[in-house]
Image: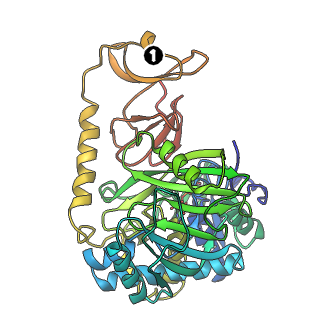
């Protein structure tokens, strides 16, 4: 599989081999965990990071990110100003600007570029976002004419230019920070239990004054989190074109009203197009729509380098959860597919909360805020999906059997009198799995783009053999 990001900069790190005491223990070696560890080490704390696989591994959200580190999160700032308050919008922007500055410091400004938030269908939403960003202190410029073209069919009506954003290599950055040695890194070290000051990892005990769970979906949590945090899936396609692209190679762009995201990688050689965010396992033909957009943005025939999907945590009010749970563990999650500046902002916030007095905007991110103040609709949708997912597990087994599953296809079948999921690989081997998610029991759905069984409730994912490849589930579904 073609690797978009730089996986070669990373040294390997040993697993934990004995008990350990440190000031701060960070669970999870994605961009969030690495940035939190770096921010705490910078404050003089002895920090140890524990990653169940390897840092920013191929299956992590970080390696599957398109990694536009920008303050322009579609229309997040104006949505907060309108649905919660102008103050909430300003605080959200302040945290993300702090995160962007932290990333700029760590990257030495490598990847600096202009970000364009563009509109395809009128200008109202774009204008509202421009006002909210300006009100939050973001330097940006309103452009009433299209600064570039995306395609013959998609005409940009206006755009907002935001200078000095970052096109990050998230894997290269995470590997480099871990190799620097300012904090200890333990790979192949899954944490199996965690509390306020201790965690268990590979049969060893780690004692720490502070524990941060940066596992994307907090796996050591209290009961209310599954109601407050959902996952949505988005898609990406990376393409090459010998004749170049319509967009300049030194910019990033995202639609304010449903348009796709665009950025370049590998010194402008590769264009990455992303979007099509949705709940549940699959958006039919999402991959094809992305490829069409990529082809339209190209000056000639495209070569598909890679296509993939990824999921991320979403909160009901659009604000991440960053702070300390009552159980004592600090969390940083719910980035809504904008985890570069949000994760870096979380690192700044948690380092300030742990080492100092906190920052003026951190109350916005409290895991105990009223998460319904942005409106009931997202929560009602989440509850509906969860209820549907639970109800579907009670359906009787269908009148379809293993022998009817064709090669390359997946079906829900009657397996020894029970409902089960079955995928027959191209070699004819059948893989039968349980359809109930081990996390909270929702009925899994087949994702044909990735050939995985996905949970529509909280985004756990399993490969077709039943192996768990994405939390919050911790065990597989193989029969
Ligand atoms: C298609 C797509 C495109 C995106 N593009 C952008 C973008 O352009 N800009 C942007 O800002 N954001 C983007 N995002 C969002 C961003 O990628 C994520 O928010 C971010 O990568 C989340 O990082 P993380 O560290 O929280 O999670 P992860 O990278 O998944 O890291 C969590 C780590 O914890 C480890 N772990 C889990 N449980 C344990 C355990 N028990 N013990 C030890 N380790 C454990 C996992 O193995 C994993 O490595 C995108 C998301 C999607 C879906």
Q: Is 281 left, or right, of 449 in this rendering?
A: left
Q: Quarter holding the N terminus?
A: top right
Return the x and y of residue 72 as percentages of the image width and height.
47, 74
- The residue pinned by badge 1 equals 405
Can residue 290 be seen in the rendering of this structure? yes
Q: Is 260 left, or right, of 381 in this rendering?
A: right
Depth check, front residue: 333 or 136: 136
Depth check, front residue: 154 or 49: 154
| Vertical arrangement, residue 478 with respect to residue 382, above or below | above
Depth check, front residue: 54 or 123: 123
Residue at the extreme front of the image, as rendered = 152
The colour scheme of the drawn protein is rainbow
Q: Is 214 left, or right, of 184 in this rendering?
A: left
| Vertical arrangement, residue 276 with respect to residue 461, above or below | below
Residue at the image position 76 percent from the left and 65 percent from the top: 179
Residue at the image position 56 percent from the left and 22 percent from the top: 425
Return the x and y of residue 224 as percentages of the image width and height.
30, 58
Return the x and y of residue 121 as percentages of the image width and height.
36, 65
- Find ligand 1 in the image and state its quadrant: bottom right
Residue at the image position 54 percent from the left and 84 percent from the top: 355
Can residue 210 be seen in the rendering of this structure? no
């Amino acid at each position: 599989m073609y690797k978009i990001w730089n996986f070669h900069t990373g040294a390997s790190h040993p697993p934990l081999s004995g008990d350990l005491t440190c000031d701060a223990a960070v669970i999870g070696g994605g961009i969030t965990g690495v940035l939190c560890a770096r921010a705490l080490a910078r404050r003089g704390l002895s920090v140890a990071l524990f990653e169940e696989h390897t840092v920013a591994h191929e299956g992590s959200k970080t390696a599957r990110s398109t990694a536009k580190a920008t303050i322009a999160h579609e229309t997040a700032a104006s949505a907060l100003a309108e649905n919660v308050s102008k103050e909430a919008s300003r605080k959200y922007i302040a945290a993300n600007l702090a995160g962007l500055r932290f990333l700029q410091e760590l990257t030495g400004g490598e990847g600096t570029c202009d970000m364009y938030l563009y509109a395809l269908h009128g200008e109202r939403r774009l204008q509202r976002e421009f006002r909210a960003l300006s009100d939050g202190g973001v330097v940006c410029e309103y452009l009433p004419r299209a600064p570039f073209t995306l395609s013959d069919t998609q005409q940009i009506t206006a755009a907002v230019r935001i200078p000095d954003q970052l096109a990050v290599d998230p894997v290269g950055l995470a590997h480099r920070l871990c190799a620097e040695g300012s904090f200890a890194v333990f790979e192949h070290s899954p944490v199996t239990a965690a509390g306020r000051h201790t965690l268990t990892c590979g049969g060893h005990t780690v004692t720490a004054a502070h524990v941060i769970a940066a596992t994307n979906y907090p796996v050591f949590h209290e009961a209310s989190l599954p109601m407050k945090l959902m996952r949505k899936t988005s898609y990406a396609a990376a393409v090459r074109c010998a004749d170049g692209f319509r967009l300049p190679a030194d910019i990033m762009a995202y639609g304010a009203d449903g348009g796709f995201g665009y950025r370049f990688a590998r010194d402008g050689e590769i264009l990455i197009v992303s979007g099509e965010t949705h709940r549940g396992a699959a958006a039919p033909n999402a991959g094809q729509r992305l490829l069409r957009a990529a082809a339209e943005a190209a000056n000639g025939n495209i070569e598909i380098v890679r296509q993939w999907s990824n999921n991320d945590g979403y909160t009901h009010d659009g604000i991440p959860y960053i702070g300390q749970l009552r159980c004592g563990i600090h969390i940083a999650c719910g980035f809504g597919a904008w985890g570069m500046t949000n994760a870096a902002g979380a690192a700044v916030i948690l380092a300030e909360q742990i080492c100092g007095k906190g920052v003026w905007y951190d109350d916005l991110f409290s895991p105990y805020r009223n998460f319904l103040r942005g409106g009931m609709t997202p929560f009602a949708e989440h509850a509906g999906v969860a209820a549907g997912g639970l109800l579907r597990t009670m359906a009787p087994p269908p009148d379809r059997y293993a022998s009817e599953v064709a090669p390359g296809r997946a079906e829900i079948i009657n397996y020894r009198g029970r409902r089960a999921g079955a995928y027959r690989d191209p070699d004819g081997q059948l893989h039968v799995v349980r359809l109930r998610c081990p996390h909270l029991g929702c009925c899994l759905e087949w994702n044909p783009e990735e050939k995985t069984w996905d949970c529509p409730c909280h985004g756990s994912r399993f490969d077709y053999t039943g192996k768990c490849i994405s939390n919050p589930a911790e065990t597989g579904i193989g029969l």
